[in-house]
Amino acid sequence: LRPIAERNVRILAEAVRQGYHIVTPEPSAALCLTHEYLHILPDEEARLVAENTSEACTYLWRMHQTGTLQLDFRPQRATIGYHQPCHLRALQVGSPGESLLRLIPGLQVIRLEHGCCGMAGSYGMKRENYRASLRIGWGLISALRQPSIQAGASECSTCKMQMEQGTSKPT
């Protein structure tokens, strides 16, 4: 694990020094770069990476707050069930994906406050854990099954998979 972290931090720190900001599509990746790597490599390069890394929706929300996000959204007449992933909560950045969805005219966003989806990274992908992972996520899955909700939304791809496995609705 340490050699991988060292290699990643070396490459990403160089990108930051060149003026780039690191944007990850997954809350888990952002958590790894901003918290976990600091425990593995408590050095200046790891701190540089951590301070210059954002999860994608967090990055886009900051753009909106500074007025640089283009907001020419077409109105949507739909209701979305939004699930906040555990790793996004751990980042303590609020709910930027949900906030972004609320910028779309006509879109109704219902926050599904029903705990973990149950996937727990790769836990729910293992055959022996599949049923248990669905039971863990049953509160979320049941809420998403409400007839008034047309689709689900989440920043996390494994939450997305679990939400789609438990319902017939796209996420």
Image (tube, rainbow, N blue to C red):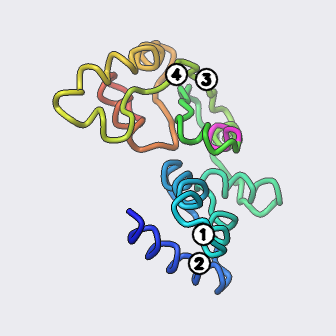
SS under mark 4: loop
In the image, what residue occupies the spot 61% across and 65% down?
A: 42
The amino acid sitting under disc 4 is Gly
Residue 73: % across, % down? 65, 49
Q: Earlier in the sequence, mark 3 or mark 2?
A: 2
In the depicted structure, whether residue 2 falls above or below residue 76: below
Q: Is residue 127 magenta?
A: no
Q: Which label lies toward us, 2 or 1? A: 1
Query: Mark 3 to mark 2: distance in Å?
Result: 38 Å
Query: Mark 1 to mark 3: distance in Å?
Result: 37 Å
Q: Quadrant of the C terminus?
A: top left
In the depicted structure, whether residue 135 falls above or below residue 153: above
Q: Which residue is mark 3?
A: 110
- Looking at the image, do the residues carrying marks 2 and 1 touch, with CB atoms under 8 Å apart? yes
Packing grade of label 1 (10 A; few <14, some 14-19, many >=20) is many
> Most prominent secondary structure in the magenta stretch?
helix
SS under mark 2: helix
In the image, what residue occupies the spot 77% across and 63% down?
A: 68
The amino acid sitting under disc 2 is Ala
| Magenta residue span | 94-98
Q: Which label lies toward us, 1 or 4? A: 1
Q: Earlier in the sequence, mark 4 or mark 2?
A: 2
Query: Mark 4 to mark 3: distance in Å?
Result: 14 Å
Q: Which residue is mark 1?
A: 46
Query: Mark 4 to mark 2: distance in Å?
Result: 35 Å
Residue 115's label in the rendered image is 4
Is residue 6 shown left or right of residue 33? left
The amino acid sitting under disc 3 is Ile
Residue 13's label in the rendered image is 2
SS under mark 3: strand
